Amino acid sequence: MIKVYGDIKSGNCYKIALLFSHLHIEHDWREVLVVKGQSRTQEFLALNPVGQIPVVVSGEDVLTQSNAILNYYANGTALMPQDPLDVFRVQEWQFFEQYSHEPTIAVRRFIQTFLGLPAERQAEYDQREAPGYRALEVMEKRLAEHEFLVGDSYSVADISLYAYTHVADEGGFDLSRFTGIRGWLQRVTQQPGHIPM
C-alpha cells in the first residue's frame, strides 16, 4: 500500500490527494502537521531530510516534492500530455507555481490562516501581496482565453496551480476581478474524481 505523509490542508499535500482521487490510486494517508513540528521528528527526517511534506512511500521508493510526485504518477495517463512541448508547458507552469505563486499566495495563507497573522510576520505578509497579485495576473492572462493551463484539457499543471489558488482568499487575495481564474476554478471542480481540500 502506498503511504502518503502530509497535511490535507497544505496545498502541496492536497495536490497528491486530488491526483490520487482522479486516478483511483489507493493509499494510506499518514497525517503530518508542520505547525505541530511533526515534520521535524527523527522518524520523519529519516524519510525526508529536508523536513517537508508531502512524502510518498511506495515499497522501497521515497518520493518528495509535490510537483515531481504529480508527474511521476500522472505519466502515461490523460493528466500528462503526450506531446513533448506540452510536457514542457506543464513543467513551465509547475516551476512558476513553486517560484512565483507558492512563495506569495501559499505563504500569506499560512501566515494568516495557520498562524493567525502574528504581528512579527505582518511585514512579510504585506510584502508578499503585490507579487502574489502579479502571479495571479499571469494566470489570468492565460485563463481568460483558454479553459486550462496547457493545451485544451485538464492536466497536472492545473492540479499544481489549483491547490493554492482556490484558497487564495485565506491569504487575503481577492479573486473577484479575475474572471478567467474564477471560471477555471469552477471547471476544475467539475473534473471526475474531484475532491475538496
Image (tube, grey):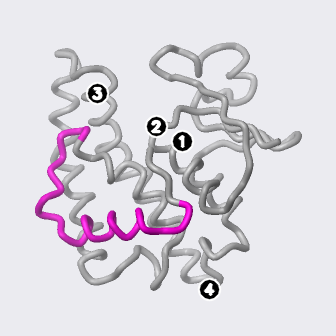
Task: Write the residue at 34% across / 53% down.
Answer: 100
Q: Provide the residue designation for mark 4.
A: 83
Task: Tell me if mark 3 has few (under 14), some (14-19) or many (20+) residues whose alpha carbon lies within 10 angstroms of its own.
Answer: some
Q: Nearer the viewer, mark 1 or mark 3?
A: 1
Q: Position of residue 103 (x, y in %)?
A: 35, 43
Cα separation, mark 1 vs mark 4, equals 27 Å
Q: Which mark is residue 111?
A: 3
Q: Position of residue 65 (x, y in %)?
A: 60, 45
Question: Which residue type carries mark 2?
Answer: Ser
Q: Nearer the viewer, mark 1 or mark 4?
A: 1
In primary-sequence order, the first of circles 1 and 3 is 1
Contact? badges 3 and 4 (CB < 8 Å): no
Task: Write the residue at 65% across / 82% down.
Answer: 82
Question: Which residue type carries mark 3?
Answer: Ile
Position of 43 with respect to 123 (left or right) is right
Position of 135 with respect to 59 (left or right) is left
Secondary structure at numbered mark 1: helix
Q: Nearer the viewer, mark 2 or mark 4?
A: 2
Residues in magenta, as a range: 170-193
Secondary structure at numbered mark 3: helix
Q: Provide the residue designation for mark 2.
A: 10
Q: Provide the residue designation for mark 1.
A: 13
